[in-house]
Each structure stands twice: as structure tokens, then as C-alpha cells.
Image (spheres, grey):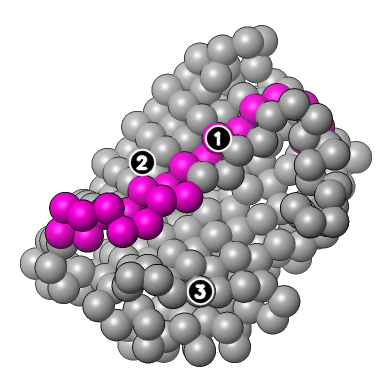
Amino acid sequence: VTTSGGVVGGDRLTFEIGASADCVATVTTQAAEKIYRAAGADSEINVTVSANDCGFLEWMPQETILFDGARLRRRTRLDINGSARVLAGEIVVFGRRARNEKFTYGFLHDAWRIFRDGRLVWADALHLKGAIDEQISDLHAFDGAAAVATAIYTAPDAATHLRTARGLIGDGGASCVDGVLVIRMVNADAAALRADFAQFWKIFRHETAGLPATLPRVWEV
């Protein structure tokens, strides 16, 4: 899966991903998604992942890079049914700091909704607006982090893998509620976070699904 060279204000992208029966599938993106400065209108990305009794479905897009002045409204919905197991995640990068660029103003509303057998079991949203640089710098928010990563594993056996997740993420955090295992990682270095996130993903997919501890080649660059 790939999109354009970047997203600007007013762009609207929709992804629909599905797996059924005993399917095992990995869906990723060709490159990082760049969200450029918007003149006023929000850009929108809508992702729907549907899993019906599938063996294992992974949605692991490469990182989303927010340029200064970007305006992004993203909604990710997971519809999980029966015995399906899904591992989904994302990385949000607050500007290209290697080029001395930061995400200091604009708008971000990044929402997740997870439904299991038609019932809402988890809802979450990251909302940034106004003095975004102050919010990212706040000790009780991101403490100056350059990027934040989220991984979500939802499956009948999710709770049994909480200890495994916590052992893989170092200073990150993990919790499990109602069959939804949520992992968070932050880092002051976006490249280091990507590497740590990839390493976590490789081992976690192996521990949970018995799949090889490898990632798609586009992640190994």
C-alpha cells in the first residue's frame, strides 16, 4: 500500500483492509507518510480494518511525519469478529528534527475505535492544537519527545501476552483491558523509536503468532 508523495490540507484518503477465514496477512506502506503545512483545511485519513475469524492480521504503516503547520484528522477503526487476531500500530513524528524542524503549530486529532463482535471495547484519541510545542515539551505529556508509537493487539488471548509486551518495550508502557492490549513508546530520537518499535514488532509477532521474527523489507532500511 502506498499513497502520494505527501498529504496537504483538504486531501482525503481512505483505506479498507480485510481478512477472513484462517487468513494470515501483513499490510504495510511503501514509505513514511508526510503531512505538509496546510493553508487552512484539514487533511483526513480514514482507515478501516475488518477481521473475521482470521488467523493473524497486521496493519503496520510506516511513520507519519507532521510538518510544522500540518492539520491532520485521522480515524482508525478495527472491526474484530469471532476468533480473529489483529496487531495494528502507528508512529507519529513531530517534525523532522534532524533538519531542525519541529511540529509547533497546526492540528492533530488521531482517533482509534475498536469493535469486537459489534461492541465498542476501546476508544482513544490524541488531540493537539494551539501551543503544540508547549504541549510536546511538557514533562507530564511527551517531555520533549520527537515521536510517539502505538501498538494494539486485540485477540482472545491478548491478556496472556501483557508480560511479554512489557518485557520488550523498555521504558514504554503497556496495559490490557477487555481483550485489548495497548503498547506506547516515546523517544527524543525518531529514528531510534522506529528501530525500537520494529524490534518490538518482530519479536511480538513471533511470540503471539509463531511467525518469523522479521518485517517487510521496506521496514529494514
The N terminus lies in which quarter of the figure?
top left
Q: Secondary structure at mark 2?
A: strand
Horizontal placement of 209 versus 197: left or right?
left
Q: x and y percent of residue 145 in the render? A: 79, 55
Numbered badge on residue 175: 3
Residue 153 visible in the snapshot: no
Disc number lying in front (1 or 3):
3
Sequence-first disc among 3 and 2? 2
Q: x and y percent of residue 201 in the render? A: 51, 73
Numbered badge on residue 86: none
Seen in the picture, residue 41 relative to 55 is either above or below; the reply is above
Horizontal placement of 115 versus 65: left or right?
left
The C terminus lies in which quarter of the figure?
bottom right
**Alpha carbon distance from label 1 to label 2:** 14 Å
Examine the residues drawn in magenta and state their main secondary structure. Answer: strand
Q: x and y percent of residue 84 in the render? A: 20, 69
Horizontal placement of 87 versus 148: left or right?
left
At label 3, the amino acid type is: Ser
The magenta stretch is 102-124
